[in-house]
Image (tube, grey):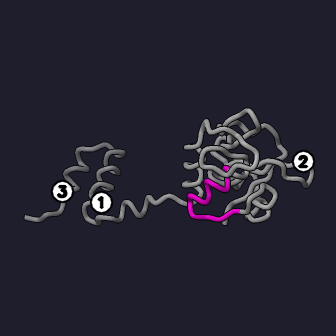
Amino acid sequence: MSALPRIPKLVSRASTASALTAATVAASVLLPGMAGDAQAATPAAKALKVAASKKGSPYQWGATGPYRFDCSGLTLYAYKKAGKRLPRVAADQYNATRHLSAGSRKPGDLVFFHSGSYVYHVGIYAGGGRIWHAPRTGKTVSLEKIWTNSVWYGRVR
């Protein structure tokens, strides 16, 4: 008798969505170790998760974590944990990224707030027009809606 799972019988009893789940399970049985590799997170996804994990951490000017942050300190910390290097301040981080249009942004990209050519704030794009950021003195790391159109986007290389 074969050790392979009976996929046809399993699929015939399942809905389409369940069939896809069954195929995934069968593939993990036939190719152990491959499912984990296929689902490995990108540095951007890891950085986004790290930033979100810092929710509620207090803002402190010049702080780079792990318990207190300023805006660029949070992005620096999150990407460092994801295995990427960034410069210390927001303007230098902008210059170190690949610049993107709003239509090309993805979760994990950096959002730079500017006045003219002066970059004054940075956060990590979370999707849905929201960012994780360390706002200012008296506030904590939080998820907020992007409040202005004066933003540029950058992808960490």
Compute the Cα span from label 1 to label 2. Answer: 51 Å
- The span from disc 1 to disc 3 (Cα, nearest Å) is 14 Å
Report the span colored magenta: 74-86
* Tag nearer the camera, 1 or 2: 2
Q: Tag 3, which secondary structure? A: loop
Q: Residue at x 56, y 54 (%)?
A: 45
Determine whether, in the image, residue 115 is placed left or right of residue 44: right
- Circle 3 is placed at which residue position? 6
Whether the residues at callouts 2 and 3 have beta carbons within 8 Å, the answer is no
Most extreme residue toward the left, as rendered?
A: 1
Report which quarter residue 139 is drawn in. Answer: top right
Q: Are marks 1 and 3 in contact (CB under 8 Å)?
A: no
State the residue position of label 2: 115
Disc with the residue nearer the chain's start (1 vs 3)? 3
Mark 2 crowd level (few <14, some 14–19, many ≥20, 10 Å Cα)? few
Mark 1 near mark 2, Cβ–Cβ under 8 Å? no
Quarter in which the C terminus is drawn: bottom right
